[in-house]
Image (cartoon, helix red, strand yellow):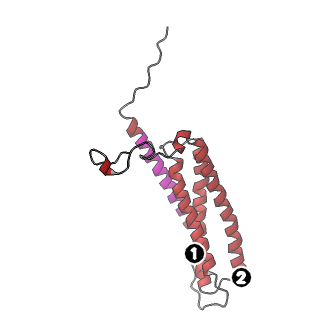
Amino acid sequence: MTNPRPADPVTPDAKPRSQRRLVVTAVLIALCIIVSLLLIYICTPWWRPVPLDKVGNEPDAAVLISTYILIYTFFIAAFGGIVPALVEDGTVGRWQLVALAFMFPVVGLDLYRVLNSAGDLYVTTMRSLVPSAILDASFEFGIYFLVNVVVVLLALVIILLVRPSGSREVQTGVERGRSLDPRDEPNGTAAG
């Protein structure tokens, strides 16, 4: 006769283990970002602007290029906001890894696009960005915009599908029948 397995006791080092896992994950993410930035810097030596002797006669596309830079940085910030929702409890499942595997290269791509657009911004400020280059920048923006939107939607769908159903509900102290006003608590602290 076999004895039933006792319930797993909570080990005192369970919390430090999860903290270590979180630290290792954060270090790996930081290394990925650093490697991406180094690759962008190494692979784009052509970007360093060459001083132009005179101002050209080409149209000024500074607002257009600046808008592209703003949108690329918005997507970088959006990915930064999505990552904590993907790894909410410190553990990462298969689908979260899929989302992260798509997000990190796209963030690197966005950083590259910001760098490239900054070069275009310099050239257009000097009125030397020819109309065909402006059209090319607009065409590239359309492609990269769609890539970003698809990856953001993929990440959001994964967040919604992978989360347990109970974590989708937002509960506040008021919904649980408690006040959030610290003056209403006997010891002067808010319930939470």
Q: Is residue 79 visible?
A: yes
Front in this rendered view, residue 186 or 111 = 186
User: From what the image shows, is residue 55 above or below residue 129?
Assistant: below
Does the magenta segment cover residue 24?
Answer: yes
Disc 2 residue type (three-letter): Pro
Start and end of the magenta stretch?
Answer: 18-38
Query: Which residue is pictured at 48% across the width and 47% down the height?
Result: 25
Q: What is the quadrant of the C terminus in the image?
A: top left
Q: Residue furthest left?
A: 187
Left or right, 189 with reference to 133? left
Q: What secondary structure do most residues of the magenta stretch adopt? A: helix
Q: Position of residue 33 (x, y in %)?
A: 51, 58
User: From what the image shows, is residue 50 above or below residue 106?
Assistant: below
Query: Which residue is pictured at 64% across the width and 90% down the height?
Result: 56
State the image quarter where residue 129 is shown: bottom right
**Which residue bears the numbered disc 1?**
118
How crowded pointer 1 is (Cα within 10 Å; few <14, some 14-19, many 20+) is rated as some
Does the magenta segment cover residue 121?
Answer: no
Secondary structure type for disc 1 = helix
Tell me the number on the disc at residue 131: 2
Between marks 1 and 2, how big is the CA–CA gap? 17 Å
